[in-house]
Amino acid sequence: VGPLPRPVTTRRIVVANQKGGVGKTTTAVNLAVALAQGGLRVLVVDIDPQGNASTALGIPHGEGTASMYEVLLDDMRLEDAVVRSPEAEGLLVLPATIDLAGAELELVSKVAREQKLLKALREYLVDHDIDYVFFDCPPSLGLLTVNALVAATDILIPIQCEYYALEGVTQLMRTIQLVGGELNPDLRLWAVLLTMFDGRTKLSAQVADEVRGHFGEETLETVIPRSVRVSEAPSYGQSVITYDDHSVGACAYRTVAAELAARAAEEQE
Ligand code: ADP
Ligand code: MG
């Protein structure tokens, strides 16, 4: 791929869906790598205590690692926890450790608990030139996800081409509206991505139609195919893009990255 256009302001994209296993982490990781390979500066913020995004980007996240937890609960500055990913030039990661599992409860008693991440990120962005931030959320709509929704400008919803694909989406939209109404009025749904599409099944095509009917324009043209290479990559601490550059999964994620970069450019005209 050639160089991708830079957005005028930092696009902060929350990859959200409270269902687990729909491709949130895979999407955040691979779009981040694809955009960074396109010459952009990208930061992945891992907000899932499982730390799957950190793993897939080759970042150690054992106990004692400076991470999201310290940023949220010990007022650590973002730049003291952000590290470079070996996956691509210009790709940065704020890792998550298992400590974050307790953060949801610990945050409850804090002042401005919903704005912790926004505050830390704003300070960081003042002197770091970043084009895209991706927030990889846990499969819930708790305080961690709310912190991401408050810190974000745009929402990307991955939807798995499976039974009950749209189940839970109403609840997610309600949470988004709630956060939007009170804490982040500019937040908006930017893109819907169909994941794990299986071209051999009628079901995948039906789900794709249903999602396009429900979301219309927001749905990205490109769909991510179900592919073994995509699921193998994380166990090597890699994105599918560096694990198997020519695989259908790598190509699909590169195409989505280009589609998003073009969408961002179009909106700025
Ligand atoms: P989430 O973050 O929403 O829980 P993941 O991105 O971790 O979802 O994906 C769930 C599982 O499905 C993981 O094992 C991942 O490797 C696998 N997976 C994701 N996308 C694909 C795909 N396009 N093809 C095959 N497996 C996939
Ligand atoms: Mg995940």
Image: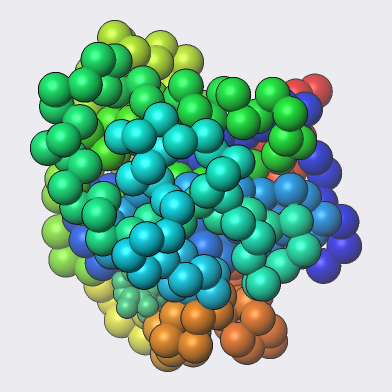
In the rendered picture of this protein, how many numbered marks are placed on residues?
0
Residue 219 visible somewhere in the drawing: no
Along the line of sight, the residue nearer the viewer: 227 or 40: 40
Instruction: Tell whether 218 sits left or right of 196.
Output: right
Above-or-below relation of 257 to 231: above
The answer to whether any part of residue 187 appears in the image is yes
Give coordinates of residue 240: x percent, y percent.
56, 79
State the residue in front, 86 or 246: 86
The residue lying at 29 percent from left, 23 percent from top is 114
Query: What is the image's colouring?
Result: rainbow
For the C terminus, the image quarter is top right
Identity of the residue drawn at 32% across and 65% down? 63
Q: Nearer the viewer, residue 245 or 127?
A: 127
Which quadrant of the structure image shows residue 141? top left
Image point (60%, 86%), residue name = 243
Determine which quarter of the picture holds residue 142. Answer: top left
Residue 224 place in picture, x, y as percent: 48, 69
Residue 3, placed above or below residue 226: above
Name the quarter where the N terminus is drawn.
bottom right
- List x then y, in percent, for residue 170: 18, 36
Asked if residue 60 is positioned above or below residue 165 in the image, the reply reads: below
Q: Which residue is at the far right?
A: 2
Q: Nearer the viewer, residue 172 or 224?
A: 172
Q: Position of residue 207 (x, y in %)?
A: 29, 61
At 49% from the left and 88% from the top, the residue drawn is: 236
Compared with residue 84, is residue 17 higher up or lower down, i.e. above or below?
above
Quarter holding ligand 1? bottom left
